[in-house]
Amino acid sequence: MTRPVTARVPAKVNVQLAVGGLRPDGFHDLANVFLAVGLHDEVTATPADTLRITVEGADAGQVPLDHTNLAARAAVALAERHGTAPAVHLHIAKDIPVAGGMAGGSADAAGALLACDALWGTKATREELLDICADLGSDIPFSLVGGAALGRGRGELLTPLETGGTFHWVFAVADGGLSTPAVYRECDRLREASGAGAGVADVPDPEPSPALLDALRTGDATALAAAVSNDLQPAALSLRPALAATLRAGADAGALASLVSGSGPTCAFLAKDTEAAQAVAGALAASGTCRTVRITSGPAPGARLVDA
């Protein structure tokens, strides 16, 4: 029997998420600066008679076990390209918060692609895997690549970025998730309500911050903190006002920067060093404003195979 294959895939934080106007196709152009961080899911692929998904770990009950699961869709996409049946058992060990704006589902899809490719011996090229990732979702290519990268288009067109050091992060996980499409719709609504308009003609083209890219390159946490931004944060706060208290608690505890991670509701806090991160985490845990707190750092490598 073929041995199981396991892929480990990182979470991400968006250190900049600049959102352009609503396009006619319903999407938005982005300047999305991703940083992979050291919280991981593991996806194990084992031969089976049919496609099956099982999940363990925190909030496993929130993860779909049918063909809507992104990992299942990734396996099907790879199998179809190579004329084979997606007969595989995918077991997902969750450590990335579910529906938390940290690309946990995208990570699982990238992990499933890598694991199934190794299990089936399809020998897909890196370009083919990235192409499948982009077809499945905007964040999935970065889950495969890891490190730091600028995402253009819907976020799927990646340019790797140089990083000059380790950045220390604390993540405050909220109760329940936020729907990414709902957050984008709220972003558009808020822009319309402001009188500025929400269309492509109304919103400046999104561009990465030169100061932020320079801070990543030099490893300067203080400079990075001054440059982080998330255009979806007002929408996330509008839909989940309680997140404002979480952000305040982290800032009051000495975080260099406090922001909603992606579409939320997880909040991300940049800390000066490991000791400062522990202090921020302790204050957040005691604040009663979040469900759990996680400490980690980045950048982290992208999806990679590991011994099961």
Image: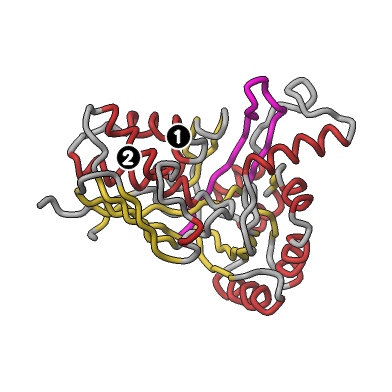
* Amino acid type of the residue tagged 1 in the rendering: Leu
The reply to whether the magenta stretch includes residue 27 is: yes
Q: Position of residue 287 (x, y in %)?
A: 71, 76
Task: Depth check: give the residue in front, 252 or 176.
Answer: 176
Judge from the rendering whether residue 178 lies leftward or rightward of residue 245; answer left or right. left
Predominant SS of the magenta segment: strand
Task: Depth check: give the residue in front, 92 or 115.
Answer: 92
- SS state under label 2: helix
Residue at 32% from the left image edge and 39% from the top image edge: 75
Q: Position of residue 266 (x, y in %)?
A: 62, 58
- SS state under label 1: helix
Magenta-highlighted residues: 16-38
Image quadrant where residue 135 sits: top left
Above or below: residue 256 compared with residue 260: below
* Amino acid type of the residue tagged 2 in the rendering: Ala
Residue underneath mark 1:
136
Q: Position of residue 100 (x, y in %)?
A: 58, 55
Residue underneath mark 2:
75
Image quadrant where residue 23 sits: top right
The tag earlier along the polypeptide, 1 or 2, is 2
Residue at 28% from the left image edge and 27% from the top image edge: 81
Above or below: residue 23 compared with residue 123: above
Above or below: residue 285 compared with residue 157: below
- Badge 1 local density, few (<14 within 10 Å), some, or many (20+)? many
The label shown at residue 210 is none
Task: Depth check: give the residue in front, 225 or 199.
Answer: 199
Residue at 52% from the left image edge and 36% from the top image edge: 138
Could you tell me how far apart the alpha carbons at marks 1 and 2 are, in whole angstroms?
A: 11 Å
Image quadrant where residue 186 sits: top right
Judge from the rendering whether residue 178 lies leftward or rightward of residue 70; answer left or right. right
